[in-house]
Amino acid sequence: MNLVLTGSTSGIGWETLLALLPQFDLVILPVRNLAKAEKLIQHLPQKEKIVLINLDLSNLACVKDGAAAILSQLDAIHVLINNAGGMYPGGKRTTEGIDLSFSSNHLGQFLLFQELLPALIKGQAKVIQVSSEAHRIAKPPEQDFSLRKSTSTVASYAKVKLYNILFTNEIKNRYASEELSAYSLHPGAVRTAFGSEASPWAKGLIAFTKLFFISPKAGAATTIFLATTAKKNLKNGGYYKNKKISSPSTLARNSKLGKALWEFSLAEIRRVFTNTGTAKK
Ligand SMILES: NC(=O)c1ccc[n+]([C@@H]2O[C@H](COP(=O)([O-])OP(=O)(O)OC[C@H]3O[C@@H](n4cnc5c(N)ncnc54)[C@H](OP(=O)(O)O)[C@@H]3O)[C@@H](O)[C@H]2O)c1
């Protein structure tokens, strides 16, 4: 069984790795800081099962190269956990001209999914998105999903976490017939490095509220539950909290919005790679 896990170098992702490493034969960790990852895993038992891949989700070219490197290691993926992400200052752009929060929390994951699709289908994979209850305060994206006009750190974060759930629903709608299944989750309010790249005021607010947060180990519990529970005991497309199915916001259940986000994401990727032919559906 093969696992691909993003965001393993800190917080929830690190605890997820510790719990899941013994349960998989091969564990691929796409990371944006290879030196940090190498140092972290050096004393792990069973570290020989781990392959580190250089992959910064905020850079689509890097995601594409990273995905090719992943596919060179395996032909089937059984679990893909899109855990990496965070809160970034509103209005900040990547070198590819994309909003940093949109790219890091949604578009990079979307492209990774598209590129890994043959291996995901072969493994009849579970795709797990670490979203957030913050999705409930997201305003309707209307025509523009890209956050180009957004300058608020918190509003941008709420929207991308909404996108994580819409993306999950769309994977179910488009690929259930190929035995792919997808789940999203809220990990709880967790004491991690979350918010360390946010705007100064958001950072201050998060630092204070962290006093009341749960541990990273507790925050990883729902991800681990979804990764290890048999598909027949889970709801395809479901949103989970505290290891239980939950109902996300009305917007997050809007299938028209999910479809529009999917089409928009494909178009954004085409805009960056003018002659890409990777997207399947
Ligand atoms: N903490 C909470 O209360 C909370 C609540 C709801 C949802 N979440 C979600 O939980 C997930 C994990 O967050 P966390 O709390 O564990 O935060 P964290 O400690 O900051 O960990 C974030 C992880 O994502 C990686 N990452 C960030 N941007 C990346 C990029 N562009 N490319 C590749 N990797 C990237 C980080 O890599 P580096 O080590 O290189 O920084 C790190 O491994 C996030 O999706 C977050 O939105 C967290």
Image (cartoon, grey):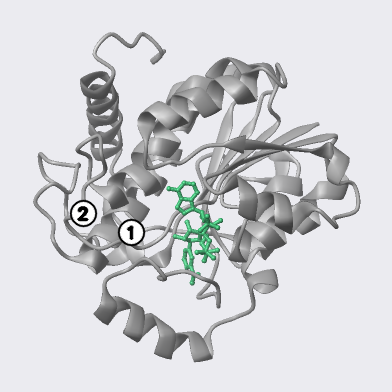
**Residue 27 or residue 229, whichever sits in front:** 27
Residue sitting at 50 percent across and 75 percent down?
A: 189
Q: Eyeballing the image, is 61 above or below 178?
A: below
Which amino acid type is shown beneath numbered disc 1? Ser
Question: In the displayed image of the protein, which residue is found farthest to the right?
Answer: 45
Instruction: Please tell me whether mark 1 sits on a helix, a strand or a loop.
Output: loop
Of the two numbered discs 2 and 1 on the same chain, state the one appearing first in sequence: 2
Count the marks: how many? Answer: 2
Q: Which residue is mark 1?
A: 249
Residue sitting at 65 percent across and 29 percent down?
A: 125
**Can you tell which quarter of the image residue 63 is in?**
top left
Which amino acid type is shown beneath numbered disc 2? Lys
Mark 2 or 1: in front is 2
Question: In the displayed image of the protein, which residue is found farthest to the front?
Answer: 35
The C terminus appears in which quarter of the rendering? top left
Measuring from the top left, give residue 113's x and y in whole percent: 49, 29
Q: Is residue 179 visible?
A: no
Q: Could you tell me how far apart the alpha carbons at marks 2 and 1 are, in whole angstroms? A: 27 Å
Measuring from the top left, give residue 134's x and y in whole percent: 35, 66
Some atom of ligand 1 lies within 8 Å of the CB belonging to the residue at label 2: no
Residue sitting at 44 percent across and 23 percent down?
A: 174
**Residue 37 or residue 217, whichever sits in front:** 37
Q: Is residue 198 left or right of residue 149?
A: right
Measuring from the top left, give residue 224's x and y in whole percent: 71, 55
Report the disc number at residue 92. Answer: 2
**Residue 214 or residue 89, whichever sits in front:** 89
**Residue 4 or residue 256, whichever sits in front:** 4
Q: Eyeballing the image, is 43 above or below 119?
A: below
Instruction: Please tell me whether mark 2 sits on a helix, a strand or a loop.
Output: loop
Circle 2 packing at 10 Å, graded few (<14), some (14-19), many (20+), is: some
Measuring from the top left, give residue 231's x and y in whole percent: 70, 38
Q: Is residue 238 left or right of residue 19?
A: left
